[in-house]
């Protein structure tokens, strides 16, 4: 049966976002002779000129190692690096700059918590609670930790609509639970989890919590003190910053108790052959020369986001994704996977017998970049009964015209395969 | 339509993917499973030699159009080849595609797979069935394709 033909109304682009496309030089390039329609933002976002300039400026004017030299360049580089830490702390409302640890990305942040915080506390039989919609980065580090310690990984199930199924949450949270590690926004489906009650419940029972905010921080204003989480992880490249930089937010009281992550320069207070002592957080967890330009670029990205305004971005993106859902729902043979109560960032779908990889290839020739595959969420794909999906994911520079281009390209795909 | 895309998804390939040949398990056969970690596609190839000395190759897969078509064509083409040509052909096929040449000469319907050369990220889709077949032999060097 043919689907409804009434056309959804595209959202108006608000004044705050009216000129953002001009800030991203890559958006003016073509792909296979077609204008680029970049809808793979959940995988990685494009970079605004302000970020590119910040990285260039560092290499052109400030390049030196940090926390070491007494010379001017080192002082300036250290200042820029630490200033960026302050911007991040303010952006997520951390109580203190020292609660922000630079990592390579959300994945390393989770691994850091596993190694430095949780491992020394675990006894065989202890439990770590995650959900069935986690990215592999919030599954595999805990599996490895369980293998090392004899702890057990427990999983909050998801519903057919791909919301968390909390019917058994009370039973899953036990006196053996040593950490609740939960995703805020699903990268694969776009589900926005109502994490506040879960964090509150865990906190009331004295259970530490970690929030995977890799797909939330660029879309939803975050306040770690209001959330009351103990840890929060995110990646720079998904928030318009360079690759190879990410953050771990950790509540200072917990960071103070944690062992180092890696050993090396810059994380020590004093070294002798008889033993070493370590710096206070955050330096204790940042061994070696860090990704200085990445941190500076991340600071610039946060300045950029703040100048546009995250509440305005959130409001516009919500309207855009609702438009995209309505538009894609009209395509015969297309099935949107998951129907979460609140959605942000991404729409996953299948199209009859057209394999997601084939959909991705056809769309690419139309200039439309999407992701196909299991989205690093194999257990979720299995739960939802699909081996893979095609996923369109949105950011502040996407427009209703991008959605229209996606829909038009999908209709061409259907002609080929359906 | 983009000419590269037209060449990739030509009728021969689509016909094989929609109705793949030898798309079934094979009882009492040697088998090997391979997965493309990029997309999660998975294929199992089965091979055995019947009492009359003829090789049979089949496959089961959860995979894209290109991988399905490549597997279908492979089972037909290689079962008809005498040994050790079949092994040599599979090795050469994988190695040729991995080299990403501008063009590639392939016999019969397999020529339809040359369209993937314009899409480097899809080359593995075409080689995966052949790699699985070679894995059977790697698991048991005494076996012959």
Image (tube, rainbow, N blue to C red):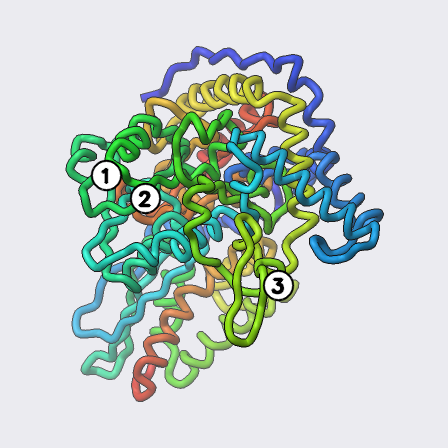
Above or below A274: residue A339: above
Disc 1 and disc 3 in contact, CB within 8 angstroms? no
Provide the residue designation for mark 3: A265
C-alpha gap between disc 2 and disc 1 = 13 Å
Q: How many marks?
A: 3
Q: Nearer the viewer, residue A369 or A228?
A: A228
Provide the residue designation for mark 1: A157
Above or below B132: residue A143: above
Q: Quadrant of residue A57?
A: top right
Q: Nearer the viewer, residue A287 or A222?
A: A287
The 10 Å Cα crowd at callout 2, few under 14, some 14 to 19, many 20 or more, is many
Q: Could you say whether the residue bearing mark 1 is in a helix, strand or loop?
A: loop
The residue marked by circle 3 belongs to what chain?
A: A
Q: Could you say whether the residue bearing mark 2 is in a helix, strand or loop?
A: helix
Q: Which mark is residue B77?
A: none
Pointer 2 or 3: first along the chain:
3
Provide the residue designation for mark 2: A381
C-alpha gap between disc 1 and disc 3 = 43 Å
Tell which residue pokes out farthest to the bottom in this image. B142
Q: Position of residue B50 (x, y in %)?
A: 21, 79
C-alpha gap between disc 2 and disc 3 = 42 Å
Q: Quadrant of the N terminus of chain B?
A: top right
**Can residue A390 be seen?**
no
Q: Nearer the viewer, residue A46 or A118?
A: A118
């Amino acid at each position: 049966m043919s689907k409804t033909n009434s056309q959804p109304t595209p959202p108006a682009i608000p004044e705050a976002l009216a000129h953002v496309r001009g800030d991203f030089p890559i958006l003016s390039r073509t792909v296979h002779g077609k204008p680029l329609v970049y809808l793979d933002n959940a995988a990685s976002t494009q970079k605004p000129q302000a970020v590119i300039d910040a990285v260039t400026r560092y290499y052109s004017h400030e390049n030196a190692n940090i926390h070491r030299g007494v010379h001017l360049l080192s002082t300036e580089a250290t200042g820029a690096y630490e200033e960026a830490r302050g911007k991040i702390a303010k952006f997520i409302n951390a109580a203190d700059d020292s609660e922000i640890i630079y990592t390579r990305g959300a994945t390393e942040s989770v691994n850091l918590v596993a190694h430095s915080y949780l491992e020394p506390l675990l006894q065989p039989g202890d439990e770590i609670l995650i959900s069935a919609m986690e990215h592999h980065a919030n599954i595999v580090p805990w599996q490895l930790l369980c293998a090392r310690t004899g702890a057990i990984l427990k999983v909050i199930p998801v519903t057919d609509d791909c919301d968390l199924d909390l019917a058994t949450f009370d039973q899953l949270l036990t006196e053996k639970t040593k950490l609740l590690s939960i995703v805020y926004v699903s990268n694969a489906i776009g589900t926005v989890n109502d994490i506040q009650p879960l964090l509150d419940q865990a906190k009331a029972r004295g259970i530490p919590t970690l929030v995977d905010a890799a797909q939330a921080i660029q879309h939803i204003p975050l306040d770690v003190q209001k959330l009351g989480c103990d840890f929060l992880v995110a990646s720079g490249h998904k928030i318009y910053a360079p690759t190879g930089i990410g953050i771990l937010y950790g509540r200072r009281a917990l960071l103070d108790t944690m062992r180092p992550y890696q050993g090396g320069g810059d994380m020590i207070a004093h070294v002798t052959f008889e033993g070493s002592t370590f710096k206070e957080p955050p330096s204790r967890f940042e061994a070696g020369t860090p990704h200085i330009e990445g941190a500076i670029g991340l600071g610039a990205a946060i300045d950029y986001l703040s100048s546009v305004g995250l509440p305005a971005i959130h409001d516009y993106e919500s309207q855009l994704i609702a438009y995209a859902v309505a538009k894609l729902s009209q395509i015969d043979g297309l099935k949107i996977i998951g129907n979460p109560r609140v959605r942000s960032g991404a729409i996953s779908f299948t199209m009859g017998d057209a394999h997601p990889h084939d959909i991705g290839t056809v769309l690419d020739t139309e200039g439309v970049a999407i992701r196909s595959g299991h989205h690093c969420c194999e257990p979720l794909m299995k739960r939802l009964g699909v081996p893979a999906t095609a996923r369109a994911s949105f950011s502040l520079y996407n427009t209703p015209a991008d959605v229209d281009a996606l829909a038009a390209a999908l209709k061409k795909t259907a002609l080929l395969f359906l | 339509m983009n000419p590269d895309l037209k060449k990739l998804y030509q009728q021969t390939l689509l016909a094989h993917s929609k109705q793949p040949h030898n798309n079934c398990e094979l009882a009492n056969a040697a088998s090997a499973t391979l997965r493309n970690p990029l997309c999660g596609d998975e294929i199992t190839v089965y091979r055995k030699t019947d009492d009359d000395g003829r090789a049979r190759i089949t496959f089961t897969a959860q995979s894209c159009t290109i991988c399905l078509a490549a597997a279908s064509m492979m089972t037909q083409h290689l079962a008809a080849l005498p040994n050790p040509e079949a092994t040599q052909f599979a090795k050469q096929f994988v190695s040729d595609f991995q080299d990403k040449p501008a063009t590639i000469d392939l016999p019969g319907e397999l020529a339809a797979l040359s369209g993937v050369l314009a899409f480097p990220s899809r080359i593995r889709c075409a080689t995966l069935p052949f790699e699985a077949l070679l894995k059977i032999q790697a698991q048991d060097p005494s076996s012959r394709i």
